[in-house]
Image (spheres, rainbow, N blue to C red):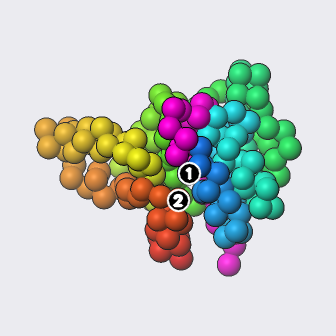
């Protein structure tokens, strides 16, 4: 059986709630303990840095992908198992999702939303069939859940869109769902 890889989309900031960083750290540790590879945006700041440092502290395999224009801003974490520099953001997102078996979204900002919606759209279009999990720590993504329900309710998306996202509230629940979905 080959190693599983999980693409994590999350903030380049920690946010105001300490539970976000705690969830990122816990999830990075859980991935490493499962011997699954972390695929992420290669930054050493915010939740990105938290999840990667936690995975590394537990001897996890880390695969980071960063566009050249963010090397300084996101403090490219060059001590990863694999560190890839791309020319553009689009290439970054493509390399990340193509090298993962599943996507997990932690709290984040516009970049995390962009990544989630691209993965969701690609899934809707049949370009991949990878599980997408949203980790709704302390209700952070409640408004997003409501928005997606509105898109469906108002006829701008098929009801199947809701089936493409698995909602979880803890890192442990995310791992449990990933084990179920990937095995």
Main secondary structure of the magenta stretch: loop
**Which residue is pictured at 86% across the width and 44% down the height?**
79
> Which numbered disc flags the more N-terminal residue, 1 or 2?
1
**Which residue is pictured at 36% across the width and 45% down the height?**
139
- The answer to whether residue 92 of the structure is visible from this angle is no
| Left or right, 24 with reference to 130 | right
- Helix, strand or loop status at disc 1: helix
Residue 166 spot, x, y in % from top left: 38, 58
What residue did someone put label 2 on? 171
- The answer to whether residue 105 of the structure is visible from this angle is yes
Which residue is most to the left?
154
Number of numbered callouts drawn: 2
- The residues colored magenta run 1-20
| Left or right, 15 with reference to 134 | right
Residue 37 spot, x, y in % from top left: 70, 59
What residue did someone put label 1 on? 23
């Amino acid at each position: 059986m080959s190693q599983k890889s999980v693409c994590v989309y999350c903030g380049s900031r920690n946010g105001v709630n300490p539970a976000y960083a705690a969830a990122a750290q816990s999830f990075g540790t859980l991935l490493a303990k499962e011997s699954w590879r972390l695929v992420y945006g290669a930054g050493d700041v915010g939740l990105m840095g938290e999840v990667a440092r936690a995975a590394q502290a537990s001897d996890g395999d880390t695969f980071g992908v960063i566009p050249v224009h963010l090397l300084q801003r996101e403090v490219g974490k060059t001590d990863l198992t694999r560190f890839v520099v791309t020319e553009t953001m689009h290439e970054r997102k493509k390399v990340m999702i193509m090298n993962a078996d599943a996507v997990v979204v932690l709290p984040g900002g516009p970049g995390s939303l962009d990544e989630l919606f691209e993965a969701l759209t690609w899934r809707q279009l049949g370009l991949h069939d990878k599980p997408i999990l949203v980790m709704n720590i302390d209700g952070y993504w409640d408004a997003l859940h409501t928005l997606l329900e509105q898109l469906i309710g108002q006829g701008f998306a098929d009801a199947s869109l809701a089936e493409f996202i698995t909602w979880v509230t803890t890192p442990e629940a995310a791992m449990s769902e990933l084990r179920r979905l990937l095995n």
